[in-house]
């Protein structure tokens, strides 16, 4: 109060006054700081617990080592805080070398992820050996060279049994491993949370492209088995949609510069399929869809795989149906995809 004057009959009272009077204010400040720290710690722990709770359990099956998009997809999964990557399996020719490339990416990202080489050849038909051309970069990068032998399918099965109803299978290559899994263990499809596949060619014409998509064509028997399985959620992002995610060589060099992505940059020098002066990011889009479903619009229906007509082996046929067990991507938001992809590296 203005003008208040305190007088003391004895000097000792004045000493006690100036010592004791500020104590309540000092104590209140200490208590407030203590409460603030407790609340801050609680909020932080809640945030960490929430992020951990919201992480999606994923197993990725990939033919990494042929084209650069598999490696770009794996880099995204390794960096994504929403992704609990439980394991990596490889498929098609020289799967051990493919596992080595996956290992190099994991080590470069500071991650220790189980890696299992899978099937080198299709289930029943013969195919020429697929060489892993990107293995040329391995001498310059740390990587593991030995992996469990012939255990990929068993690993997927065991992991799903430990996490029933929680795992998303993300397939970025031919479906041989997954078809073998579903054949040996027919209960497994119903134990999945979902399967998201880079597979098929459905609604749109691509200039200069034939009617079949590689992952369905290479082992069409396997694709037929997987599409016939009863899975709670079965999403295919076909090449007619993934082909919209294109970068020119110049844009690729800017976005995936050697300074930011040195291993990706090295691997990009080796491409099995030449796309002219551009890079097509099929697998990164499909990987991003796992965590950002609204990147695409979808249509429900039934997918079948032609494995009888010589002229159209591996052709994926889509029949629209409101209660169909399959979903196909129909459109994609390219700008939002790139925003979501690069956000995990910030």
Image (tube, rainbow, N blue to C red):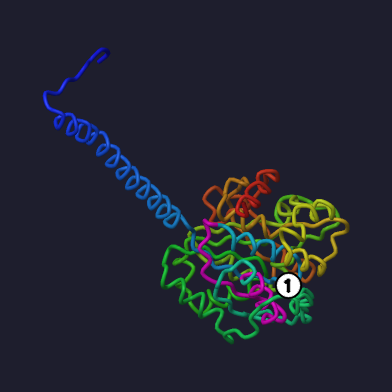
Q: Assign the N terminus to one quadrant of the image.
A: top left
Res. 22 image quadrant: top left
Where 40 sits versus 223, above or below? above
Q: Which of 97 and 332 lies nearest the eye of the viewer?
A: 97
Residue ranking furthest to the front = 11
Where 169 sits versus 299, above or below? below
Where 120 sits versus 31, above or below? below
Q: Which of 291 and 243 lies nearest the eye of the viewer?
A: 291
Residue ranking furthest to the top = 3
How many callouts does the rendering have? Answer: 1
Residue beneath the point at 48% across and 74% down: 186
Report the residue marked by disc 1. 65
For numbered disc 1, what is the local secondary structure? loop
Residue ranking furthest to the left = 9
User: What is the span of residues highlighted in magenta in the rendered image?
Assistant: 81-106
Residue beneath the point at 32% across and 48% down: 38
Q: Local crowd at mark 1 within 10 Å, few (<14), some, or many (≥20)?
A: many
Where residue 182 sits: x, y (%)?
Answer: 53, 74
Residue beneath the point at 58% across and 57% down: 235
Where residue 336 sits: x, y (%)?
Answer: 65, 44
Where residue 155 sits: x, y (%)?
Answer: 51, 78
254 lies left or right of 80: right
Where residue 228 sits: x, y (%)?
Answer: 56, 66
- Residue 225 sits inside the magenta stretch: no
Q: Which of 270 and 169 lies nearest the eye of the viewer?
A: 270
Residue ranking furthest to the right = 276
Q: Which of 49 and 69 lies nearest the eye of the viewer?
A: 49
Where 346 sits versus 200, above or below? above
């Amino acid at each position: 109060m203005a003008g208040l004057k305190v007088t003391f009959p004895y000097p000792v009272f004045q000493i006690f006054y100036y010592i004791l009077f500020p104590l309540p204010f000092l104590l209140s400040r200490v208590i407030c700081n203590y409460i603030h720290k407790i609340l801050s710690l609680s909020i932080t722990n809640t945030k960490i617990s929430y992020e951990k709770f919201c992480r999606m359990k994923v197993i990725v099956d990939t033919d990494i080592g042929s084209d650069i998009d598999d490696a770009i997809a794996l880099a995204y999964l390794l960096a994504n805080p929403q992704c609990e990557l439980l394991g990596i399996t490889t498929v098609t020719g020289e799967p051990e070398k493919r596992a080595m490339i996956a290992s190099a990416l994991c080590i470069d990202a500071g991650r220790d992820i189980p890696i299992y080489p899978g099937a080198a050849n299709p289930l029943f038909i013969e195919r020429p050996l697929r060489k892993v051309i990107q293995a040329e970069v391995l001498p310059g990068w740390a990587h593991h060279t030995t992996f469990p032998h012939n255990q990929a399918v068993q690993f997927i099965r065991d992991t799903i049994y430990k996490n029933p109803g929680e795992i998303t299978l993300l397939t970025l290559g031919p479906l041989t491993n997954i078809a073998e899994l579903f054949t040996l263990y027919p209960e497994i499809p119903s134990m999945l949370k979902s399967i998201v596949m880079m597979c098929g060619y459905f609604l749109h014409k691509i200039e200069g492209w034939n009617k079949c998509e590689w992952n369905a064509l290479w082992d069409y028997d396997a694709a037929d088995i997987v599409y016939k399985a009863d899975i709670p959620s079965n999403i295919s992002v076909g090449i007619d949609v993934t082909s919209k995610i294109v970068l020119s060589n110049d844009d690729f060099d800017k976005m995936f510069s050697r300074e930011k992505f040195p291993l990706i940059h090295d691997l990009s020098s080796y491409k099995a399929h030449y796309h002219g002066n551009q890079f097509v990011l099929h697998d990164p889009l499909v990987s991003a869809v796992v965590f950002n479903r609204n990147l695409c619009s979808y249509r429900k229906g039934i997918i079948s795989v032609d494995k009888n007509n010589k002229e159209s082996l591996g052709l994926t046929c889509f029949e629209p149906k409101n209660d169909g067990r399959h979903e196909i991507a129909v459109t994609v938001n390219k700008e939002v995809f790139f925003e979501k992809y690069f956000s995990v590296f910030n």
